[in-house]
Image: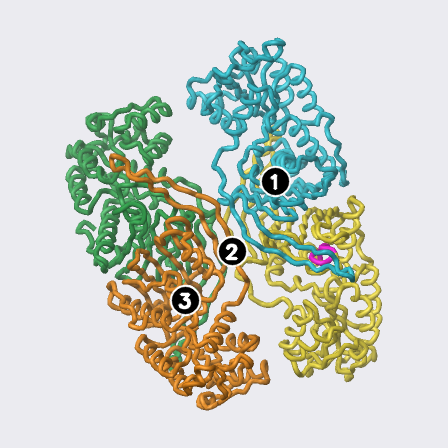
Chain colours: A green, B orange, C yellow, D cyan
Amino acid sequence: MTSLNGRGSSNGRRNGVPSKQRPVRIAVVGLGYWGPNLVRVLHELPGAEIPIVCDVDGAALAKIGRRYPAIELTTQYERVLADDRVDAVAIATPVATHYPLAVAALNAGKHTFVEKPMSGSVTEAEALVAVAEERELTLMPGHTFLYSPPVNVVRELIHSGELGEIYFISTSRVNLGLHQSDASVIWDLGPHDFSILRYWLDELPAQLSAITRSCIMPGVPDIAFVNLQYASGPVAHVELSWLAPSKLRRTAVIGSRKMVVYDDTSNEPVRVFDSGVNLPEPTDFGQYKLSYRTGDIISPAIAPIEPLSLELTDFCGAIRRSAQPRSSFVIGIDVLSVLEAAEVSAETGGMVTLESSSLT
Amino acid sequence: MTSLNGRGSSNGRRNGVPSKQRPVRIAVVGLGYWGPNLVRVLHELPGAEIPIVCDVDGAALAKIGRRYPAIELTTQYERVLADDRVDAVAIATPVATHYPLAVAALNAGKHTFVEKPMSGSVTEAEALVAVAEERELTLMPGHTFLYSPPVNVVRELIHSGELGEIYFISTSRVNLGLHQSDASVIWDLGPHDFSILRYWLDELPAQLSAITRSCIMPGVPDIAFVNLQYASGPVAHVELSWLAPSKLRRTAVIGSRKMVVYDDTSNEPVRVFDSGVNLPEPTDFGQYKLSYRTGDIISPAIAPIEPLSLELTDFCGAIRRSAQPRSSFVIGIDVLSVLEAAEVSAETGGMVTLESSSLT
Amino acid sequence: MTSLNGRGSSNGRRNGVPSKQRPVRIAVVGLGYWGPNLVRVLHELPGAEIPIVCDVDGAALAKIGRRYPAIELTTQYERVLADDRVDAVAIATPVATHYPLAVAALNAGKHTFVEKPMSGSVTEAEALVAVAEERELTLMPGHTFLYSPPVNVVRELIHSGELGEIYFISTSRVNLGLHQSDASVIWDLGPHDFSILRYWLDELPAQLSAITRSCIMPGVPDIAFVNLQYASGPVAHVELSWLAPSKLRRTAVIGSRKMVVYDDTSNEPVRVFDSGVNLPEPTDFGQYKLSYRTGDIISPAIAPIEPLSLELTDFCGAIRRSAQPRSSFVIGIDVLSVLEAAEVSAETGGMVTLESSSLT
Amino acid sequence: MTSLNGRGSSNGRRNGVPSKQRPVRIAVVGLGYWGPNLVRVLHELPGAEIPIVCDVDGAALAKIGRRYPAIELTTQYERVLADDRVDAVAIATPVATHYPLAVAALNAGKHTFVEKPMSGSVTEAEALVAVAEERELTLMPGHTFLYSPPVNVVRELIHSGELGEIYFISTSRVNLGLHQSDASVIWDLGPHDFSILRYWLDELPAQLSAITRSCIMPGVPDIAFVNLQYASGPVAHVELSWLAPSKLRRTAVIGSRKMVVYDDTSNEPVRVFDSGVNLPEPTDFGQYKLSYRTGDIISPAIAPIEPLSLELTDFCGAIRRSAQPRSSFVIGIDVLSVLEAAEVSAETGGMVTLESSSLT
């Protein structure tokens, strides 16, 4: 592999950084539910190329082969790792395999994109980070919602101060249908909301409590209610469910100045309410005289851009610039911390206090 | 007072049970936000009469006087208690006064209706029950939702088995506006949902955990997230808030056979979804093959009857028949148990285990 | 009657204009569906008083008497007209009686408010205007929607040019329920939309065509589709129906710069869409390259004021100032012109051309 | 070409009817907006094959070639007609070319599927039918909505009598965006609604009136309001627009027994309202006492099948069975009759009476 990145070539370790003149060559590993989306988007991405894809299922490979005749197909992961054309690996396999596949890719000198959640535990994720840092490779978890235009509109409303102090966030992510049979709904749907909360608030929850129930399959929670408290003030509630009469993706963000509803299923995914409570100073007798403000409601126009395309562009850019992508491994580990804490709380029934990763 | 009820007259203690020939005469005490509704409905109720109303605020009294010239007005509660025309007292004052006013009424031999929550604590409520039982008087908390037609349609769907096993219930009761400044949102809005859950499931939660935040006024929680677990299986989540961009009254009941959404703000307050998951026996290899069922959705026609009218009719009937009303003191105490547990959990941060009242 | 209005007293003809020091005294005539609303609102209106009400139905009178003991009740319209306390009459009787009652009131020197439609024909309305002008009395049709805050928000959007050129307006006013059995749906619901269109566009339609059907009662159309064309460009469609699965009050106003949806049943009655088509100059080959613009959507906050209160305040003010009210007789006659034309078109099946009233 | 259809082979004229053993081979002509959908669906249809596609635009051809490497590409329509492998032609070109392309296809002995509207006029369509009948070939217009599952659910509700007598139908088909620049909105969107109405009511309107406006491009109406009257009783209104703040696909069907709302953009595309008016016999005094019935609302589950797939299956079946497809040329001509009448009415401003095609 010819490295054309200055820093990479000077210390001999920064392998796999392609020149600006040629595309980043990415092997997609795992062609189940999500992998074909990675193939479709990378295929259309200027600056990216897919030399080879890998899956243990020959039928899944063949289907890709019919659509993209130029892409090489393999059932042997070793062939991907040994392939000098491959700058980076994008892993979209079941969660349990994220760690072994990613650590092998990093050890083979490949930049590595891993679907969310990044691995099966914080410990595994920290081990991956250690390898990536040692070898100066990009390691990126695929928290796609961090590239969603409406999520970013809301983040800007929060960070600009337009919403004022964030009082609380309440979110429901429910639909009828189990996406995975090997994981709980917390590990399946939770990474979406916990990564969004982390991205909006720039903070891990200080503590949380969760209850779950395994309604359909013994030992596989399919409904979870998670309450979260943040050190800087906000509280949050996350409802996750594979059992629901209809799809619901509704997040309310309540600030001291304005309120926002973000609904990914709506034609108006972000609605900003200029509503709130005015609290004057207490009177002599300690009486509070509250008044309520209900002003305009605005649905800002949102650019219709596919988040996955932005995410994979960021991955390529991170490789080229040797910089952290927006969906950084720090966020990936923080999300894992919340997933682990929620699982512990659901099992033990108590409030769980979170510690930030030493990496953060 | 002429008692025409057989049992009442035989032992001389069952005072205040009017004959069928004459209306139950009820004094309304407290004419703030809710009391005038009691006056309006009792005024139109065949079988009830309002001889006198009482409030410390002369303006509130005068307003009622203009609308109902025949009703006597007083600022002296003692006058109500001493009034022989008065069979029963309906108390709609701030929560802190429920106990002293109710205990005085019962001691004066008056049947007593108390707005929800029944008193400021389980202890107080149990003391009230002791007096009522000793004096053989009706004591009824005003859990109006138990008389709501849609709530009863859902209860029938649950109790008839049409929904199958109840997996979980998720409910949001939010709007912009603090109704009370002397109580938390748990004590203000919580009695609605906790009485409905108690009425639907016939069971107290075994344990719960809650988080709250006092966003606007120090020490007065205005947002609460409460997670509940029931011994027989169901889990539930209750979101209560005085801070919200728009009014939301949405309750999803997920059963093994069907699902229901109950929304009090909708023209179709109950919607029944014939949807669910089919879980066949696991195959030889322990694999589960789930399939999803999405069938018809039905919005049953709901009788447009005012719950408060049904509630006060039940109060009068309970007095006449010396029977427990649907909104019984047992339910009233159970609701208080949940309120107290939620408050404890919010303060201590942990899961709280509930014990059933010895009365239950 | 003591007239304290300068102009009135100087020429001796401007009777019935009360001084600023005393309220306008209005008799309400007709206590069916709508009349009690006039009583309720006038009762609370500073600057107005109701000395007497009149209806042929003793029960309707008695009901008002119980609510408002100070108001005199009569079944004799002559007594109202002869009553020196009465400055003005507000008529809320069936349409067929509007003309005889109003002409009698004007001839008795009373300012006259008549519910919509103002009379049974343009001819009758013009006769009323002649009497009112001759006697210098205020004559006002009750087009309440001209005082609706959302209707005025939309009018301002049109008149300020914010919507650009008005391309077309499409409106549906449907629900389940016949309000009147003596009139067609055109005469019952049409005055709402035709008065709004007249108020927004300041223009009568040049021509219209309508189809109707009498589905339930022979000879009483309960559904109407009316197409309208305006000389200045806009076209409009008005759907009116007493037969509908659910209430619909939806009006879309499409302008060259922005679009508006006005929905009286919504919590957000006005929504402004910054959407449209950009049409550049045609290219050399006469090809048009259109592009579409989809921008922010804004729901302006609307003051929660009851239109009827504003309307009756305007009536009182018009009397005091000897000025035309917003809901002028000119608008009242224009609405009648449209009603008559729609009826003719529905019967003859053709396009009908309208002529403006000579009064306009 | 080997004909294996009995009747076809016996008279030597029924060319192009393939045996059951081999697929119907269909050439797709026109690869603009809609043609690629025909290719996609036919490609996946058991019993169909695409030997060749044709378009004048090389880029459109190349795009299909990349996706379906096995399909032959041509810019020469003559090559399609001369191709012995081709049993049938599916034409998805601009409306103006429908007639010449279809008549050439039929004259070449090919079964012919033509996108809606079938041709530019009734006269052209009748000429096509004459050729098709003379040569015993299938001629099918592509009225896809006749294969839409919700449209068929509504049709069944009408035909089974469940809705009772059909009083009226009101429909809106509006969105922001001109699909065609060479045709009016009547010709672009109208075929959808007029084919559905024809399919539901089995009847042409007796007369109609329409108004249109060319808001954006001179001479190209982009908004149309069409009122229709049917001899058997129903009236209908069709609103068509390329200018609208949001997409609307709402059709209300009001019957004497029940009412239906069909909304193609909803998750519940068909909603059945058990609502209506009860009209008892008039009393002695000729008074009508109406009562309103508001019962359950049901959203029947609808099979998620792509209409285009059902439509093209019907085309293949019609060829094999020498039978009329559901979307028959009779319906195609009736739709053209309505389009022509609407255009005449919009230009002349009057009510237009329709005559049924002699073919019907």
Q: Secondary structure at mark 2?
A: loop
Amino acid beneath label 2: Glu
Q: Alpha carbon of mark 1 to alpha carbon of mark 3: how far? A: 45 Å
Quickly name the residue at label 2. B268
Q: x%, y% of residue D353? A: 76, 36
Bin the neighbour count of mark 3 within 10 Å (Cα to Cα): few under 14, some 14-19, many 20 and up: some
Q: Is residue A122 left or right of residue B222?
A: left
Which contiguous range is marked in magenta?
C184-190
Q: CA distance from mark 3 to mark 2?
A: 20 Å
Prevailing secondary structure of the magenta residues: helix
Position above or below: A222 against D59: below
Marker disc for residue D160:
1
Residue C188 forms part of the magenta stretch? yes
Residue D101 x %, y %: 61, 19
In front of the other: B6 or B165: B6
- Which residue: 66% across, 78% down? C47
- Marks 2 & 1, CB-CB < 8 Å contact: no
- Whether callout 1 and callout 3 share a subunit is answered no
Give residue C291's quadrant in the image: top right
Q: In the figure, is residue A42 to the left or right of D356?
A: left
Q: Is residue C32 left or right of residue D151?
A: right
